[in-house]
């Protein structure tokens, strides 16, 4: 049964939220202030019609809006969307008791040319053919995509390549994830979800990589064929990332995060880069300081080490594979650094933050993709004697609720 509700605000995941007698009601694609007609299903409701639209509403430009789970706020104009993401950060900090008024800058749009990496899902459809695309909103079903307007031009052939590879591999009957990255030497494709690969199928993939002109094709991080070394420019260095390895979603996003991290570090001569990945920050930091870099992922550390050794004009980079969740750098180990940068996964860096709080490191730069865990870690640092100098929200995941942050703390 249809009913009218007034949307009061946007929730943390980008849904409109209305207050009702039965509690909050979440309405996808509805904006704050709108009067909407909905059909209720528990605490969620399907949007039927926008009776009184918000002035911030714009027309969607992707035909899959409402079905595809990749975009939550495509009908939200960009300027107010950036302000909303800033508010998400400020709310998270305030909930943890972190005073942030006047310290949080405007949200920086870092979408740039678009996403340079994406993970497509592949499933066998009812007709036996492969279905390749993104997950449907709030579902494990996969929507077959012909294109995604959020991808960078360098990813123009990513979906056709993923479909061609999936058509060969779905014969094994297993659901697949295909991570495609645009590198300076072409597309790098890594497939996850397979078991052992029979030799005839491996030979098919080698031929297919040639037809698709892939730089590299890998299965579970092991190269089936490397026709060219996939490389990315990172400052003065040339990085060959490991198959399926983590990279910031957009080139501008990585550059923006790195520039802000370098600004925070300032003139520090000895810097630790923790949860460093393949070195997006470490390789740039090494242009001005000696760097110790640590991360759990051994392939990422190997790639960082090789890039540092092959670059000209960098100061010494020491790279170590280390589980910083279970074995964070202790306060005594941290004593040799002037500054520390950390960029953990969404779980944050609680154990490492506690060691930093007990240390004498003057400057800490926290880079985060999760405002909630950043706020928790910030409260730990502040309780240990740091003050928040500034926090800058960054938007490299356009039309989503994800917000990156670079926060600088000093003693």
Image (tube, grey):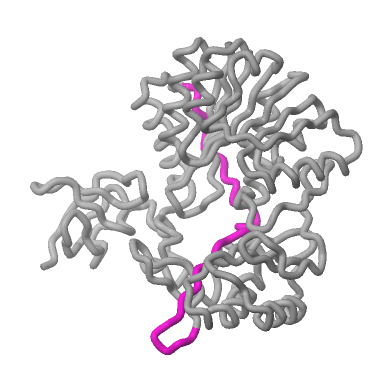
The picture quadrant where one finds residue 210 is bottom right
Indicate the position of residue 154 as horizontal and vertical percent values: 70, 64
Q: Which residues are magenta?
A: 102-129
Q: Is residue 107 magenta?
A: yes
Q: Looking at the image, which is closer to me, 67 or 281?
A: 281
The picture quadrant where one finds residue 98 is top left
- In the rendered image, is residue 404 in sight? no
Quadrant containing the C terminus in the rendered view: top right
- In the rendered image, is residue 159 in sight? yes
Q: In the image, is 398 to the left or to the right of 265?
A: left
Q: Is residue 338 magenta?
A: no
Q: Is residue 72 above or below residue 406?
A: below
Q: Is residue 143 above or below residue 380?
A: below
Residue at image coords 50%, 81%: 130
Indicate the position of residue 254 as horizontal and vertical percent values: 65, 44
Residue at image coords 45%, 20%: 380
Residue at image coords 72%, 52%: 241
- For the stretch drawn in magenta, the main secondary structure is loop
């Amino acid at each position: 049964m249809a009913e009218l509700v007034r949307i009061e605000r946007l929730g943390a995941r980008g849904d409109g939220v209305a207050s009702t007698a039965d509690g909050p009601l979440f309405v996808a694609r509805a904006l704050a202030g709108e009067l909407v007609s909905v059909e209720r299903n528990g605490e969620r409701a399907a949007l039927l019609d926008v009776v009184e639209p918000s002035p911030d509403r714009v027309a969607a430009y992707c035909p899959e809006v409402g079905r595809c789970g990749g975009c939550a706020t495509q009908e939200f104009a960009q300027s107010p969307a950036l302000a909303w993401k800033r508010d998400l950060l400020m709310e998270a900090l305030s909930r943890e008791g972190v005073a942030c008024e006047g310290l949080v800058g405007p949200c920086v749009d870092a979408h740039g040319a678009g996403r340079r990496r994406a993970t497509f899902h592949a499933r066998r459809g009812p007709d036996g053919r492969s279905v390749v695309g993104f997950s449907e909103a709030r579902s494990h079903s996969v929507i077959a995509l012909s294109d995604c307007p959020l991808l960078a031009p360098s990813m123009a052939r990513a979906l056709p390549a993923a479909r061609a590879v999936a058509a060969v591999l779905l014969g094994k009957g297993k659901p697949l994830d295909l991570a495609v990255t645009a590198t300076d030497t072409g597309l790098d494709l890594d497939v996850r979800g397979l078991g052992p690969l029979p030799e005839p199928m491996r030979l098919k993939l080698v031929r297919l990589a040639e037809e698709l002109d892939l730089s590299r094709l890998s299965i579970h991080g092991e190269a089936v064929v490397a026709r060219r070394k996939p490389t990315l420019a990172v400052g003065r260095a040339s990085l060959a990332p490991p198959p399926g390895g983590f990279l910031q979603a957009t080139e501008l996003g990585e550059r923006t995060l790195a520039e802000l991290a370098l600004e925070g570090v300032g003139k520090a001569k000895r810097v630790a880069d923790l949860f460093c990945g393949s070195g997006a920050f470490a390789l740039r930091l090494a242009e001005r300081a000696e760097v110790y870099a640590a991360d759990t992922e051994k392939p990422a550390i190997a790639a960082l080490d090789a890039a540092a050794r092959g670059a000209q004009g960098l100061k010494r980079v020491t790279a170590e594979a280390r589980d910083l969740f279970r074995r964070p750098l202790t306060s005594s180990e941290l004593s040799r650094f002037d500054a520390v940068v950390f960029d953990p996964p969404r779980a944050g860096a609680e154990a490492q933050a506690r060691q930093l709080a007990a240390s004498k490191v003057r400057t800490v730069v926290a880079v985060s993709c999760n405002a909630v865990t950043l706020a928790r870690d910030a409260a730990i640092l502040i309780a240990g004697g740091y003050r928040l100098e500034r926090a800058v929200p960054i938007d490299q995941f356009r039309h989503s609720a994800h917000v990156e942050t670079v926060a600088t703390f000093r003693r």
